[in-house]
Structures are given as C-alpha cells and as structure tokens.
Amino acid sequence: MVEEHFIPEKYTKSIESGSFTWSSPSNIALVKYWGKKANQIPENPSISFTLDNCKTTTSLSFSKKEDTTSFAFEVFLDDEKKDDFKPKIETFFKRVEAYLPFLKEYHFKIETSNTFPHSSGIASSASGMSALALCLMSLEKELSNTNISEENFIKKASFLARLGSGSACRSLEGDLVVWGSHDAIKGSSDLFGIKYPYQVHSNFKNYQDTILLVDKGEKQVSSTVGHNLMHGHPFAQERFKQANKNLSDLISILKDGDLDKFIALVESEALTLHAMMMASMPYFILMKPNTLKIINKIWEYREKSGSKVCFTLDAGANVHVLYPEEEVNKVLEFIQNELVAYCQNGQYICDVIGLGANKI
Ligand code: PMV
C-alpha cells in the first residue's frame, strides 16, 4: 500500500459545524522505534503494548469559515488556552492536508485533557495525536458519501497519527500493535500500525505496567532530535538489524508465554535504546540516578523472589515496571516498600494492557 491510497475521493456532503470526541491511550514499546527516514517512516519495525488508564481525551469542534487559504484553530489543555501547542499541530495539519483536504475549510477548537498528571514526564504525543487523528477521521466520515469500513477508518487514522508523532500510530487499537514492515508479520506496514496478528499466550493477558515517575521535568533532548541523531550514528545499521531480529524472536516468545525470554528481550531493548542515545554525537543521557537504582532493585528482587517482573524505558527517566497479572499484589508491595522512594514525590501510575481508542 502507498501513501496515495489515503487521498480521499471528492467529498459529496457538506457539514456546517459540529463536534467529535475520542479518547485514546498511550502505549509502551517492547521493541523500540528509534531512527526514522523522511515522512515519519521508521528505520525499523516496533511493537508495543497499548495502555488503558493513561489516556488523552480530545474534542474537536468545527465550524465552516469563508477564508480557505490558511489553517485556523485554537488548542486548550484542561480548559486553558495553549498557544505553545500550536506549532506542533500546525506542522501536523501541513503534513496531513493532502489526505484531509477539508482542513482549511473549517475553524477548529481542539480541547484536550490527559488522565495522567500534567507534565508527569509521560509523553502525551502518542495518545494526543491519535485522539486528534480519530476526531478528524470522524469528520471525514461525515463528509464522504462512501461508507468507510471500520478497518479502513482505523488504518487511515493510524496513518494520520503517524504523521503527527510516529509512535502515535500504535495507540488506536489494542492490545499489541506492530508498526513498520517486517517479513514475518503479515500485513505490517511502515505507513500505519496493525494489531499483532498472531497467537498470544495467556501469560500476557492483563499484563501490568506500573509507571514510576522518576523525573517529571521537561526532557533535555526531544525525541525528534534523538531520532535525527541516528543518521550517521556508528551503530545505527546494527541496531536496526537487531530490532528486526528481536521482533522475529518475540513471535515465539508471545506464543509460548516464555516470560524469561520476554524479560531478556524487553530489558535489552530498553537499555539499547538508551545506549544509542549515549553513543550519539552529541551524546546525551536521559536516565537519572534513580532510574538506575530502580533497575538494580528490580534485578535484585527478581533474583531473590523468582518473580517475572521486568522494566522498560521510553525516551526519558521514568521506569515502566512490567509484570504478569497474577503477581499484582506482590509486585505492588515491592514497589511500595522499595521503589517509591526513588519516585519524584512518591508518584507512580498503575496501568494495564488495554484495548485501544474509544469514541465518546
Ligand atoms: O513517537 P516519537 O517520535 O515520540 O518516538 C518515540 C520513541 C520511543 O518512545 C523512545 C520508542 C517507541 O517506539 O515508542
């Protein structure tokens, strides 16, 4: 499938004004996307767990306008006007205009809120961009005469979300989503995320993710800059090969429910992501001392208890603690007793693998 496929036929209907609301979850990658080509095409395929409690809810209100030469919109976060969000959305609109040719015909009011604490260090770009893409798709659906299937609706929404923030294309469905073309994964594409199409062992049912908020400050290096530093990176090609292999290996791990192999693969992916950052030029470190303390505590606890708890990281200092549902009580006790001390203001968020976005 090619990009042109997402250019719509001429709209047959007209709609003056209205509003749509979608709520979309965040996701956490098991095999990481780090490095991209032009137009948000990933250098390697990735796979993530969709989350459930960490969500963004976005309402898009629209009304027709006379002047169709430029975009017109306002953004609100928790009822507060956020002009600093506008450049990112303007860039998004420019990137998707060819696929949503109505964008300049309306004035939009975008009202958004997150379930996770504001500036918790949890990226809202994945959940936020996917919720916005879904609202825009709802409007397109009203404008079109042809009935778009649910599958194609989600596919195009994921395609659009990717143009807002790469990993956002993995936030529409659950509970495992693959983005990026991979020979062993049927239907996988660089253009949008797909639901993981193979068997998943019951060990992964309701898998838990407790997010330890180690550092809630602004990241010193954005993921856009980080991705770009993979161009000319001395280890880039090996890393892209490794991600492909890890995704292949994960197929049998997910099928057999082999938690030891799962732990080794997921933790290695997290540390490799951060190793790539440290080996970039200029180099940078997003982990904090408490990130390392937590990792060591998790290793110690696993060693002495035989628990199947493990960690992963995104592009920041926070730690995602992953574990099977049957260990909930024990791991939460361990977190309370031994890890909370390393969290900023003792804060953490309990989440679980989820099923994707919802129209409200
Ligand atoms: O979607 P972006 O451009 O913010 O990049 C996300 C990159 C990681 O979160 C580090 C990895 C991933 O696959 O989600």
Image: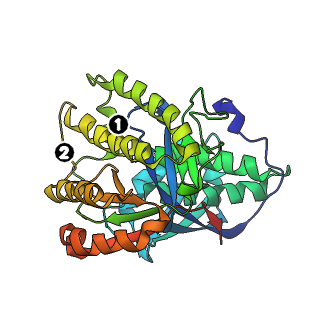
What is the count of numbered marks? 2
- Left or right of residue 151, residue 48 in this image: left
Is any part of residue 261 visible from this angle?
Answer: yes
- Locate the C terminus and report the quarter of the image it occupies: bottom right
Q: Which residue is mark 1?
A: 227
Q: Residue furthest bottom?
A: 79
Q: Residue furthest left?
A: 289
Q: Give me the residue at 50% from left, 39% from top.
A: 250
Asked whether 328 or 173 is in front, the reply is 328
Picture coordinates of residue 194 (x, y %)?
63, 44
Picture coordinates of residue 269 (x, y %)?
36, 40
10 Å crowding of disc 2: few (<14), some (14-19), many (20+): some
Q: Give me the residue at 33% from left, 33% from top.
A: 228
Q: Quadrant of residue 118?
A: bottom left
Q: Which mark is residue 112?
A: none
Q: Which mark is residue 285?
A: 2
Cβ at disc 1 under 8 Å from ligand 1? yes
Asked whether 56 or 18 is in front, the reply is 56
- Left or right of residue 224, residue 131 in this image: right
Q: Give me the residue at 68% from left, 51% from top.
A: 154
Picture coordinates of residue 168 (x, y %)?
50, 50
Cβ at disc 2 under 8 Å from ligand 1? no
Picture coordinates of residue 359 (x, y %)?
66, 67
| Discs 1, 2 touching: Cβ within 8 Å | no
Rounded to the nearest angstrom, the CA distance separating label 1 from label 2 is 14 Å
Secondary structure beneath dot 1 equals helix
Q: Amino acid at mark 1?
A: His
Q: Quadrant of residue 255?
A: top right
Q: Amino acid at mark 2?
A: Ile
